[in-house]
Image (cartoon, rainbow, N blue to C red):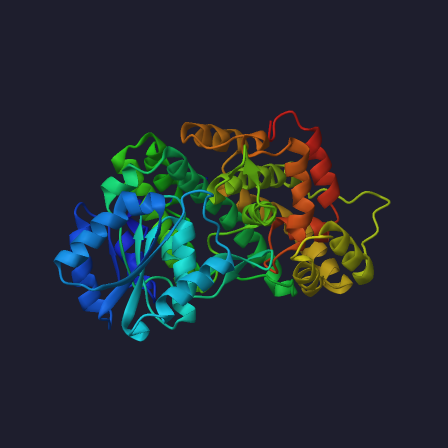
Amino acid sequence: MDNYDKASIPSLTDCLNAADETRELLINRGCYTEIPALLERFYQADGVYLVSDENTREAAGKLVGAILQEAGVPIRGELCFPANPRLHADYSSIIAIKEGVSVLPNPDATVPVAIGGGTVNDLVKRAAAELKRTYLCIPTASSVDGYTAYGAAILYDGYKQTMSCPAPLSLAAEPEVLAKAPPYLSSSGFGDLTSKIIAGCDWIVSDTVEPLGAPGANRIDTRIWNMTQPGLMDYLERSISAAQGNSDAVIALFEALAITGFSMQAFKGSRPVSGCEHLFSHVWEMEDLSLDGIPVTHGHKVTIGTLAATACYEIFFADPSGPPSPPRDYVRPGPSQRMNAVSSAFKGNRSHDQVVKTALEKYTDDKTVARIREAVTDNYRELRDRVLARLLPYEKLREMLGKALCPLKPESIGLARNQAIATARRAQMMRNKYCLLDLLWDMGVLETTLSRLEDSKTYLC
């Protein structure tokens, strides 16, 4: 990966200042005792409503409740979700939170407080937005980047989507609590952090095709790019032992994930930190992917998606002289053929209608596709150099993920290898946000890329 002058990389404080929703992030020993002061400083409130699950209530909720009571902060209500089955970011739980707050004597002056991991945070975040309230977040694991992010990933009517909602006004993350989280949560957070490599590569691809009229493409915003990409490898190296409970690594991981969330606040979208690797994960989340009856974490699904995306990048850019050509008999499907293919791929899925609608919205007309193919071919070497400067080689990525105790094979998250690879077809149909999978589709080489991936003895093995 390319190198940057560390002195020019924005600090955590710089990134917090660049965000426009979160005002304070505490990540220091004993920071829970500062929560009453946060409530007084930033919130117009006369009480709190605590939301956790049984595990996070034990990890932090009881202590936070005791501190609030001692400080004289009224606890107006509490909702504690069961630990088993594992909580899902389903809209029905948002309704439960809203109902819990709405029946309070003075709901408009009550601050929702999320005490838990990424799922609890996303649920409270969206519920607070619908209640038109700001909320406070108390993370209990370095497991996701969503704590500080704009938007919440919610399963609504069978379709995993990012719903608009502001990030927390303040956060209090106790390092000792983060370090005591189950190892799989820290490894999940590390996997989520590695996905920012692909997000950067996809943004380069998007930046290249945006002037050509490609649907869902964005130009690179240098200010936001600099928040996440230049310091990424340093944070990955510093946080690699987080799953072993190394406190310094856990803090580094949490800081890195917080920064990526701040970049989403500044951008008002997930483009800076989410690429096609997350689309793999979204497909599996819609299918409620589980291993031995236990739901696979978001970060572990993203990990396999990141490996798959890295493999696809290496296959597409394997030849330094030019991009791969579509098969001689390749005929680009027309809109009706495309609609039928998408409809068939998601037949029986509750998200069927939404995915078909999205796939048609992102369908690129023939003239635009011709411009994309010509531009990518003419500027292939420059694009290849830009992408490979960001991409971590597959073997190095795999080695790093192994050290961080992340899953390395599809079987580790309950998928056969061929199932994981085939997911790329459905992933490309989702989300109108231009990425590598869209480039492969527009270039007519998605199927040949997947065939080479299937035939490989290196990738996802």
The structure residue drawn at horizontal position 29% and vertical position 73%, both measured from the top left corner, is 105
Q: Quadrant of residue 150?
A: bottom left
Q: Nearer the viewer, residue 183 or 295?
A: 295
Above or below for 389 versus 164: above
Q: Residue at x 50, y 42 (%)?
A: 389
Q: What residue lies at 72% left-to-right and 42% top-to-bottom?
A: 324
Residue 313 shows in the view: yes
Instruction: Answer left or right for 210 relative to 128.
Output: right
Q: Quadrant of residue 70?
A: bottom left
Measured along the vertical axis of the image, is residue 294 above or below residue 337?
Answer: above
Q: In the picture shown, does residue 80 fall above or below 364?
A: above
Q: How many marks?
A: 0
The residue lying toward the viewer, choosing from 22 and 77, is 77
Q: Tell which of 235 and 391 is nearer to you.
A: 235
Q: Is residue 319 visible?
A: no
| Left-right relation of 243 to 174 | right
Residue at x 46% of width, y 33% of height: 406
Determine whether 58 is above or below 18 in the image: above
